[in-house]
Image (cartoon, rainbow, N blue to C red):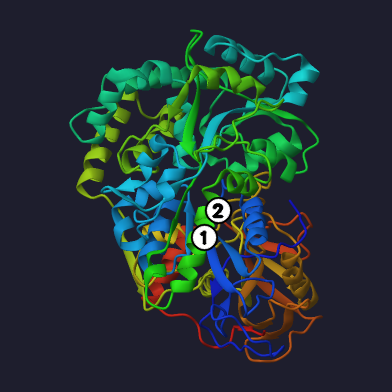
């Protein structure tokens, strides 16, 4: 969606040739000649606190509430996202580049490195403010390294407007749900549009529609624990779930092509295009619909895993965890540590919980004394399930949590199962083998493809990608969109060995509309200098990602750009690599990845490459061998 420019963008640290000139304003210690922390000027008289931001968190409301509560601080949210966010979080923490306050949905997956990277909160009184059961997942070795956010409820989001217009009724059993799906599909509208491009959402369909028979109860819990520790097998359990999964396929709930569907695509189908009637998401969907400027009303219903009156379930998980960077405990950081603790203390109060939620709690807070979960038109369909206590915990096939080895194997095989190329016995064997390998080698980074002398900033990483695209396409100029996951990236190249897992975190294919079959591909475009400059300006006024702090901007190979993040005219100059002025009337061949904007591409697309982004980047890293940031003045920052 096209939006007004946001004030906070992904933090980038630029080690290229830059300058901190222009206004003569004294800069805060956190901002230097090689650092863009925000598109809005920061006061040098205030302490700056950086905060990690991810999808699934109400970042706008939280940043607004914290800035209002702490007006004498600079509160800067920094967007992170990757195909494997768990791995990216681990790399961010171990590299030492993580933010002061770390908020993540994936904190449990890095519990093994928490003592080395996260500040120990055990000596403070935060625990007294939280529900005891919620704190259990925040403790590592008896110590407290992060606090639980509110509990998120996953269920089925439905278009209440479409339901009312067509007379569709909410189901009260699995059989009624299947009948409803068939009825809606017959109208030409996709009844439910899953997004299986990521492993955990892909697993939801299997686990939640099978929860009553396969995953609930003492016996099933004991089986799952035995599988996690390597003594049990999927045999005797997974087959039942796969039979139900086949039923879901036959009813039109899931199909193999759903494994190509990105979350943003199915959200557009529900909120804007109205080409599907249901998706799987959380109670935050009501907010997402408003952010998407949808003209329909929505509601939420539970998953039905059987025809019994108690076979309705919602999945309940902590929406995020929040902790402090261990570096705040270092000498010289006393002031920042004290402020960060004040922020945590405020968040740990009923007042703070309501404020960071935007004024109204629409999730189940784990802070003692916080307001109860109130019924609304949106959540009326799940209140009975909540009152029954049918809140299922997240199903982790391995103790390491989300995106584990067994889950990856399962999801890969589920697509093949839908395509008819493998059977249930193969999936069972593959899951068992992946579990065994995962236990033996907890962190599988894949093949080593190169190395980096130092950690690259987001913009430096973008410059490397722009060069890779330019070389692959044989173009005059290569562009990489930084600050968004829609045909762009927000990742880092980290110091040390580079593996295929690291390449994967830099992928430009996390988002973008799939209505254009050539999107999420490398384009070679012929455009004039004027069209090229207009394109770079266009990026600054369009925010494809909603709900996260981001403002996209282009970095380039084959150009020298002077960029003023704190000034109204941010693109100060654009010259060719040899220092000559960009000829506005001349025609240039430009390599870029897809098209994230609502406006039509101004140039002529002369070629579309079928090469995968990961393959292009892998080839570039292997060719370079050992990577270093460019130091030839490709991107100069002017304050």
Q: Quick one: 158 or 367, which is closer to the camera?
A: 367
Tell me the crowding category of disc 1: few under 14, some 14 to 19, or many 20 or more residues within 10 angstroms, Cα based: few
The residue to which callout 1 is attached is: 342
Label 2, on which residue?
346
Q: Secondary structure at mark 1?
A: helix
As drawn, is 398 to the left or to the right of 269?
left
Q: Check the image and report above or below for 562 versus 1.
A: below
Residue 616, label in figure = none
Query: Residue drawn at (73%, 57%), measured in percent from left and top?
Result: 597
Q: Residues within 10 Å of mark 2 (few under 14, many from 20)?
A: some
- The answer to whether mark 2 and mark 1 are in CB contact below 8 A is yes
Of the 4 image quadrants, the one containing the C terminus is bottom right
**Label 2 – label 1 distance at C-alpha:** 6 Å
- Residue positioned most to the left: 231
Front residue of 283/372: it is: 372
Q: Is residue 375 left or right of residue 386?
A: right
Q: Please state the horizontal and vertical placement of residue 102, each as a whole percent of the image.
A: 47, 58
- Residue visible at 21% across and 36% down in the picture: 229
**Residue 423 or 297: which is nearer the viewer?**
297
């Amino acid at each position: 969606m096209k939006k007004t420019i946001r004030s906070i963008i992904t933090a980038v640290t630029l080690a290229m040739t830059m300058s901190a000139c222009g206004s003569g304003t004294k800069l805060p210690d956190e901002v230097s000649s090689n650092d863009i922390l925000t598109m809005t000027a920061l006061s040098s008289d205030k302490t700056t606190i950086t905060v990690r931001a991810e999808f699934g968190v109400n970042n706008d409301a939280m940043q607004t509430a914290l800035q209002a509560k702490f007006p004498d601080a600079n509160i800067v949210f920094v967007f992170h996202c990757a195909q494997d966010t768990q791995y990216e979080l681990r790399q961010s923490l171990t590299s030492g580049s993580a933010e002061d306050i770390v908020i993540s949905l994936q904190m449990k997956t890095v519990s093994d490195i928490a003592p080395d990277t996260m500040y120990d909160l055990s000596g403070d009184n935060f625990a007294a403010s939280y529900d005891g059961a919620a704190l259990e997942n925040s403790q590592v070795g008896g110590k407290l390294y992060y606090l639980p956010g509110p509990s998120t409820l996953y269920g089925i989001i439905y278009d209440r407007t479409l339901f009312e217009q067509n007379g569709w009724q909410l189901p009260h059993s699995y059989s009624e749900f299947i009948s409803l799906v068939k009825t809606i599909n017959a109208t030409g509208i996709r009844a439910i549009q899953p997004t299986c491009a990521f492993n955990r959402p892909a697993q939801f369909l299997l686990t939640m529609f099978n929860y009553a028979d396969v995953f609930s109860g003492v016996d099933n819990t004991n089986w799952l624990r035995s599988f996690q520790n390597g003594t049990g097998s999927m045999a005797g359990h997974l087959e039942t779930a796969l039979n139900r999964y086949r039923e879901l396929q036959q009813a039109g709930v899931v199909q193999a092509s759903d494994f190509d569907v990105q979350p943003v695509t199915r959200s557009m189908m529900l909120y804007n295009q109205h080409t599907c009637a249901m998706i799987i998401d959380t109670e935050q969907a009501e907010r997402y619909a408003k952010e998407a400027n949808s003209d329909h009303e929505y509601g939420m219903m539970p998953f039905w895993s059987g025809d019994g009156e108690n076979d309705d379930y919602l999945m309940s998980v902590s929406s995020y965890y929040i902790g402090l960077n261990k570096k705040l405990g270092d000498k010289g950081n006393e002031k920042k540590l004290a402020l960060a603790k004040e922020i945590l203390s405020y968040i740990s109060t009923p007042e703070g919980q309501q404020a960071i939620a935007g004024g109204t709690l629409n999730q189940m807070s784990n802070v003692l004394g916080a307001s109860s979960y109130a019924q609304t038109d949106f959540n009326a369909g799940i209140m009975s399930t909540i009152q029954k206590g049918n809140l299922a915990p997240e199903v982790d096939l391995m103790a390491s949590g989300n995106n584990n080895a067994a889950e990856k194997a399962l999801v890969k095989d589920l697509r093949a199962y839908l395509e008819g190329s493998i059977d249930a016995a193969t999936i069972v064997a593959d899951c068992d083998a992946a579990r065994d390998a995962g236990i033996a080698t907890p962190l599988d980074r894949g093949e080593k493809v190169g190395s980096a002398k130092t950690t690259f900033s987001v913009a430096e990483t973008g410059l490397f990608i722009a060069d890779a695209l330019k070389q692959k396409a044989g173009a005059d100029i290569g562009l990489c969109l930084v600050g968004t996951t829609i045909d762009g990236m927000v990742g880092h190249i980290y110091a040390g060995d580079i593996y295929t897992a690291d390449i994967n975190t830099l992928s430009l294919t996390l988002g973008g509309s799939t209505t254009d079959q050539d999107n999420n591909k490398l384009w070679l475009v012929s455009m004039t200098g004027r069209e090229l400059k207009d394109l770079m300006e266009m990026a600054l006024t369009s925010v494809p990602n909603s709900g996260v702090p981001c403002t996209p901007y282009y970095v380039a190979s084959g150009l020298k750009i002077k960029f003023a993040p704190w000034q109204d005219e941010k693109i100060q100059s654009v010259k060719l690599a040899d220092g000559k002025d960009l000829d506005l009337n001349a025609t240039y061949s430009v390599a870029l990845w897809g098209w994230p904007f609502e406006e039509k591409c101004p140039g002529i697309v002369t070629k579309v490459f079928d090469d995968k982004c990961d393959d292009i980047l892998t080839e570039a890293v292997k060719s370079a061998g050992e990577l270093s940031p460019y130091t030839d003045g490709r991107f100069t920052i002017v304050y």
